[in-house]
Image: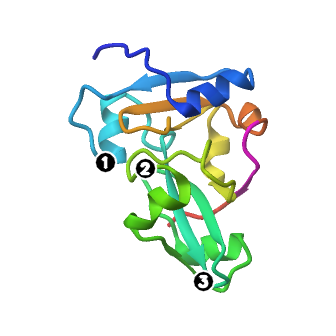
Amino acid sequence: MKKNNDKTNVMRILDQNKIPYESHCYADTDAISGMDVATVLNQNADQVFKTLVTVGNSKNYYVFLVPVSKELNLKKAAKAVNEKSIEMIKSKDLLPLTGYIHGGCSPIGMKKQFKTTIDISATDFDTIVFSGGKIGYQVEVSLEVLKRVLVFGLSDICD
């Protein structure tokens, strides 16, 4: 796999804030799903997180990061953000809302900062890996430094 030195907006934001991170590129592979990405990057699937955008009963939007090996539990997620219920947003609404496309959505650098919750399992690792804001790119950071660019909570939100 070739080393790609392209910078995404997420990487530029991390650089501007002097946040240490490691970038991973899988652009030259056939990886599509989060599990494929974890396999191609030789990463633990519990440490690689997908970014999911939801809308609550109140019409507020929420971002959840969950391991690619697990599924978001909508009831637990709703409880974590004090909503009666939440549902996934439609794929067509993702780009206008966040500025990102499906498969390249990152919690960093969205058009607007939404309440973000990361699954508590992230605390089991020194770093977590998530989308670099463009299909084919991932970034790896510690939760401790992620706090400097992203306001987030931790909660048990997976099945």
- The residue singled out by tag 3 in the image is 85
**Any mark on residue 105, and which?**
none
Q: Earlier in the sequence, mark 1 or mark 3?
A: 1
Assign the N terminus to one quadrant of the image: top left
Report if the CB atoms under discs 1 and 3 are less than 8 Å apart.
Answer: no
9 or 20: which is nearer to us? 9
- As for residue 150 lying within the magenta part, the answer is yes
User: What segment is highlighted magenta in the picture?
Assistant: 149-154
Which residue does the numbered mark 1 point to in the structure image?
Answer: 33
Query: Which element carries disc 1, helix, strand or loop?
Result: loop
Q: Nearer the viewer, mark 2 or mark 1?
A: 1
- Mark 3 or mark 2: name the one nearer the start of the chain: 2
What's under tag 2, amino acid-wise? Answer: Val
Q: Residue at x 43, y 14 (%)?
A: 5
Q: Nearer the viewer, residue 135 or 43?
A: 135
Q: Position of residue 90 (x, y in %)?
A: 41, 70
The answer to whether the residue labelled 2 contacts the one labelled 1, judged by CB atoms less than 8 Å apart, is yes
Residue underneath mark 2: 68
Structural crowding at the residue carrying mark 3, measured as other residues with C-alpha within 10 Å and reported as few (<14), some (14–19) or many (≥20): some
The amino acid beneath tag 1 is Ser
> On the picture, is 28 further left or further right than 92?
left
Residue visible at 57% across and 27% down in the picture: 11
